[in-house]
Amino acid sequence: MKSFKGKMLCLDRSDINTDEIIPAKYLTEIDKAAMKPHLLEDLKLEGFDPAKDLDGVAVIVTRENFGCGSSREHAPWALEVNGINVVIAVSFARIFRQNMFNCGMLAIELPLETIQSLMDLKGLVDLSVDVDAGTLTAVSQDGQVSTAFFISEFDRALVKTGGWVEYADQHY
Amino acid sequence: MGQTIAEKIFETHLKDTPFGDVSVLSLDRVFCHEITTPTAIQDLVARDKDRVFDPDKIKAVIDHVTPAKDSKTAMQGKILRDWARRHGITDFFDIGNNGVCHAIFPEKGFVRPGFTVIMGDSHTCTHGAFGAFAAGVGTTDLEVGILKGVCTFKTPETFRIDIKGTLQPGVFAKDIILEVIRQVTVDGATNMVIEFGGPVVDAMDMDQRMTLSNMAVEAGATSGICLPDQTTVDYLWPFIKDEFKSRQAALAEYSRFCSDADAIYAKTLTLDVTDLAPMVTFGYKPDKVTPVADMAGTPVDQVYIGSCTNGRLEDLRVAAHVLKGHHIANTVRAIVSPATPDIFSKALDEGIIKIFMEAGFCVTNPTCGACLGMSNGVLAHGEVAAATTNRNFNGRMGKGGMVHLMSPATAAATAIDGKIANSRLFGGAQ
């Protein structure tokens, strides 16, 4: 199972699409590692600088419909090679969400109020996820947010098995 | 209790329901292209599982960057080509015979009503036009599809969209789907199947239905399904005539997949298109849609006619009809990419290619081309495109570029004016 804890980054916008996560021109890469420097490089978001702000990040918190657009699994891969195995959002586009779990990564949906309370934490925030318990905790200097979340048993099995290829190979 | 077409297809393909959470479906078709498949092939090789579940159910094409533009895209093509050869995948379309996946696969008769189809491409929903459950998936789903012939889906709810009224001249399926996305929004159909119906859809040919289904994903939908009918059977007849003793028999067989009258829909929308004007997008999301008249006069640098949305013969005919006798503005450059060799060939026979060339268009080979800024027709920073494609995301056709989505008629009129314009079919100026 992958690691699901570390520094949290907030991307305070809805509808962040796959072209913003990893532009199409990098889809000619057949090596995941080649995508590392290009994660979110086309994202237009006030105060966000992909060259600096992704350093050491392990968890992304964002709003609605994250990962809309293309089916490219290069989007989760670009996150993965940057050490980001968890995205927490109000909602996800279907294919992106499925791709995350298929790779043994976590796409966690939380209500808007909880997302807002995570975004309201100031300074450096450390977030950790307990996959078995279905809980997560975010801690900053001045506060803490703990919450339960729901993922289906099948999604949990994918995360614990390491992804859909392993699961399918064992079962079908 | 009645069922929707999606529920019927799920029921007939259900293989497993792990934990009761999801449906594992058997697949009738796994489509592959050179961008998302090579990574799946490499992973299978690395796992010592370089096998395919059924070479006859797998179809492959090189379409996104073709001919290859550099060493990396050449390698993507090579990986797919070598893989197709070693596994006996005979329906593989390479340079000279290749075209945009969602145009060439239907054209070859590969999709039938009631089928389950996946591909590592979000616009796979296009094939729902044939009454199939067709969904775009990522590389891992594709990989398992190739290896095992299965894929998982949540049992989808269905969003029924009825389209009625009378389309005005100059208003097309593209304008309808843009208006649908405006109303539904970019995530209004997430995890749902959109079912298109009503008299306007019934009267559409397959090209127009594919335009509708193609953009279902821009509203978040898993698939966009049109119910199979006589039009579907007539289109498929050359491919199915040995399977059925008559068209009526084929229709009877396919009709059993149609949604029941008492099927339950999660959402419904009825759209009367009688007053619908040609539509265009603004901004960076496909639900930012407004009548062309609101954007008229906006200068554009490049016009692109093509793609899996609007690169089919009927699209080229309409654009050529608008262009005939005109030349594009000297402030604009224009590109047309017929979606398949067959479309290209027919467009040549009908004199359509000549009209494009005389109007000042660059005619490219069949390819996804400029749509996603991966190969040709890339925009420079600050440039504006008018395109018959499906996505206007920031940077889609080139970093710092703006894309306005529209119908082929509107794109042709815009090329003539050098500015966004209604076509003369809709009372535009020229």
Image: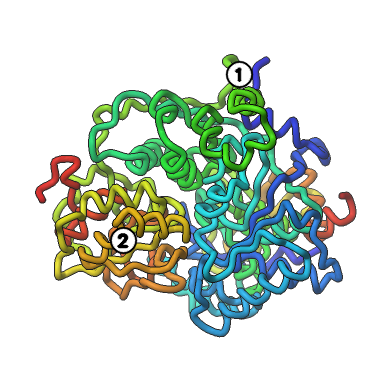
Q: Which residue is mark 1?
A: B260
Identify which amino acid the numbered label 1 is placed on.
Answer: Asp
Subunit bearing disc 1: B
**Residue sitting at x 77%, y 50%:** B149
Which quarter of the picture shows residue A13?
bottom left
| Between B46 and A105, the one nearer to me in the picture | B46
Question: Distance of mark 2 from mark 1, alpha carbons?
Answer: 44 Å
Identify which amino acid the numbered label 2 is placed on.
Answer: Ile
**Residue sitting at x 31%, y 61%:** B353
Is A3 on the left-hand or right-hand side of A64?
right
- Residue B374 x, y percent position in the rendering: 46, 71
Q: Is residue A138 visible?
A: no
- Residue B285 x, y percent position in the rendering: 38, 52
Q: Residues within 10 Å of mark 1 (few under 14, many from 20)?
A: some
The residue mark sitting in front, 2 or 1, is 2
Q: SS of the residue at dot 2?
A: helix
